[in-house]
Amino acid sequence: MEKNRKREFLYRILKFWCDCNTGRSYSRTTIKGAIPQDGAVLIAPNHTNTLMDPLVILRSRKTATSFGARSDVFKKPAVEKFLRFLHILPLARIRNGAAAVLQNLETFREVDGILAEGTPFCMFAEGRHRPKHSLLPIQKGIARIAFASAGKRQTWVVPTGIEYGDYFHFRTTCDIRYGEPIDVNAFLAKHKDCTEAETYKDFRELLFNRMKELILYIPDDENYEARLAEVKPPHKTNIPLAVILSPLSLVSAILTLPLWAAAEYLCQKKLKDPAWRNTVRSMIRMFGLPVMVLLWLIVLPGWWKLLCLAVPFSFGFFYDWLNLLPWQEIEVE
């Protein structure tokens, strides 16, 4: 019992720092809607921006939330231990192989225990991320978990939309919309005379359509880019303001030089998938800022140490300044 209390205390501390860091990753965040307070709750967001998606969902809720993540990142024991400490469970995809998929049965049992305790479970029902204003087909996994839970308790699936100002540039905006919950028990009652295949198909279609209403949805066809240009306003530049703020930007850049330089090197030179860019920037900020503050406290003399108070804001301010300048747009295949 004492070990569990200590574990939860450490989790709360880490969540607080993680939430602060996630909040500073965006210039503005809005949250609309809420999840049911009774029964088992599965949160089903769209998946466009890698690790930032679960982080913004985590920050949108005051209490604990468990998540599912791709199983291949759990291969190293130390990584698996850390992820499980963060209430993240492994979920395999078909392309991981039959043996890996069979391990999902054990994960599903763990998820059922989490739902029984009243902790919401967040699952990205598309199965993988893609930085587009669209949706991939809904996979069967979320229906399997929801149907099994509904056989034991009242169960809800909450369609959720996450909308970013930009997928690839840091410090834009984030909007989270929790939609009307799907009453899984009522859904199954209406489908009691349907075949299993029909029930799964109808549920996946229902969830897809509910999620579609919560995002800027553009069909992923040959006209996607043209439609996107019509409905999404272009990035606004402000060169005069950038010139006025350039002295402050220079100070911010110097105070956090190792952080943003490392982040941009990785983003520009090492990442094959640009959707990971903001995750890399956010993680470097989260783990690097305490080191930078400590470094400046050691190096700076006397009253100059007060500059350390500006370090936590400098990383974000530097990117805010960059966002006043023209962007290089990134196209997604």
Image (cartoon, rainbow, N blue to C red):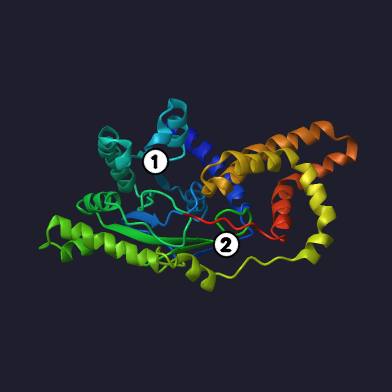
Amino acid identity at mark 2: Gly
Mark 1 to mark 2 CA distance (whole Å): 26 Å
Q: Earlier in the sequence, mark 1 or mark 2?
A: 1
Which quadrant of the figure has residue 73? Answer: top left
Which disc, if any, is residue 283?
Answer: none
Amino acid identity at mark 1: Arg
Between residue 211 and residue 35, name the one nearer to us: 211
Which quadrant of the figure has residue 137? Answer: bottom left
* Residue 82 appears in the rendering: yes
- Residue 296 lies left or right of residue 118; in this view the side is right
Residue drawn at (66%, 43%) of the image: 264
Task: Report the residue that reaches farthest toward the left.
Answer: 193
Query: Marks 2 and 1: in contact by CB < 8 Å?
Result: no
- Residue 161 lies left or right of residue 292; in this view the side is left
Between residue 289 and residue 306, name the one nearer to us: 289
Residue drawn at (66%, 58%) of the image: 327
Q: Which x, y percent locates residue 50?
A: 48, 48
Q: Which x, y percent locates residue 212?
A: 39, 66
How many discs appear? 2
- Residue 244 lies left or right of residue 274; in this view the side is right
Q: Is residue 93 above or below residue 203?
A: above
- Callout 1 environment at 10 Å: few (<14), some (14 to 19), or many (20+)? some
Task: Report the residue that reaches farthest toward the front.
Answer: 222
Query: Which residue is tagged 1?
Result: 70
Between residue 145 and residue 63, name the one nearer to us: 145
Q: Which x, y percent locates residue 162?
A: 47, 60
- Callout 2 environment at 10 Å: few (<14), some (14 to 19), or many (20+)? some
* Residue 286 appears in the rendering: no
Query: Which residue is tagged 2?
Result: 165
Q: Which x, y percent locates residue 210?
A: 35, 66
